[in-house]
Image (cartoon, rainbow, N blue to C red):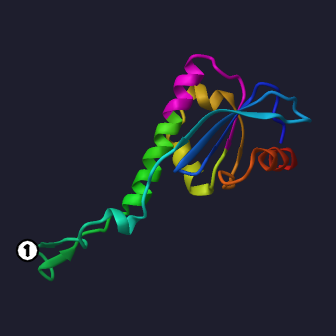
Amino acid sequence: MQVPHNSVVVVTDGRKMLFLRNEGDDVHLNLKVERAVENDNPSDGDQKTDLAGRSSSSVGSGQNSMGEVDFHQQEEDRFAANTADLLKRRALKKDFDSLIIVAPPRTLGELRKHYHKEVSDRLSGELDKDLTGHPIDQIEKLLAAA
């Protein structure tokens, strides 16, 4: 994947976000961390205090089981929306001309729901992989090979 000089690379997974800038060129990447954010998001079971509720209904069997909320996933989706908002604000300030997003498929899908036109216009590529736990040099190699 081509990552031009001064491009921004965002590596995120719905819990952690690395905002990187390529200080190298498109052949020899040199990604530098500009911002790192990690969201404390305990497992769904640790966030729940009770079982899913039940409600009475005058139609049918008389009782319905209410859908159970996955609080962990809900927070990951919120984190992705906040990441998209940060990208929008930086794009509107003309902080970058080229943007690459690296995220697992579900997070990537959630980000796409929230892309502003200015972000979409600057989007040079997307990679559907979870690389948040990888060191920067490995991220550089994987991007160069993609």
Q: What type is the residue that disc 1 sits on?
A: Ser
Q: Which residue is tagged 1? A: 58
Give residue 51's position: percent from left, percent from top: 25, 73
119 shown above or below 47? above
Q: Nearer the viewer, residue 37 or 127?
A: 37
Q: Over which residues does the magenta segment extend?
A: 85-101
Left or right, residue 39 beside residue 24: left
Q: Residue at x 39, y 65 (%)?
A: 44
SS at mark 1 in the image? loop
Q: Please tell me which residue is depicted at 40% across the width and 54% down the height of the picture.
A: 74
Residue sitting at x 68%, y 23%: 96
Q: Position of residue 49 (x, y in %)?
A: 25, 67
Asked if residue 42 is positioned above or below residue 146 in the image, the reply reads: below
Give the residue displayed 43% in from the left and 46% down from the top.
Answer: 78
Residue farthest to the right, as pictured: 27
Q: Residue furthest left?
A: 58
Is 135 or 70 nearer to us in this picture? 135
Q: In the image, 142: left or right of 134? A: right
Q: Residue 89 colored magenta? A: yes
x, y (%) of residue 66?
24, 69
Quarter holding the N terminus is: top right
Splitting the image into 4 quarters, where does residue 62 fall? bottom left
Q: Nearer the viewer, residue 20 or 98?
A: 20
| Residue at the top extreme of this rendering | 93
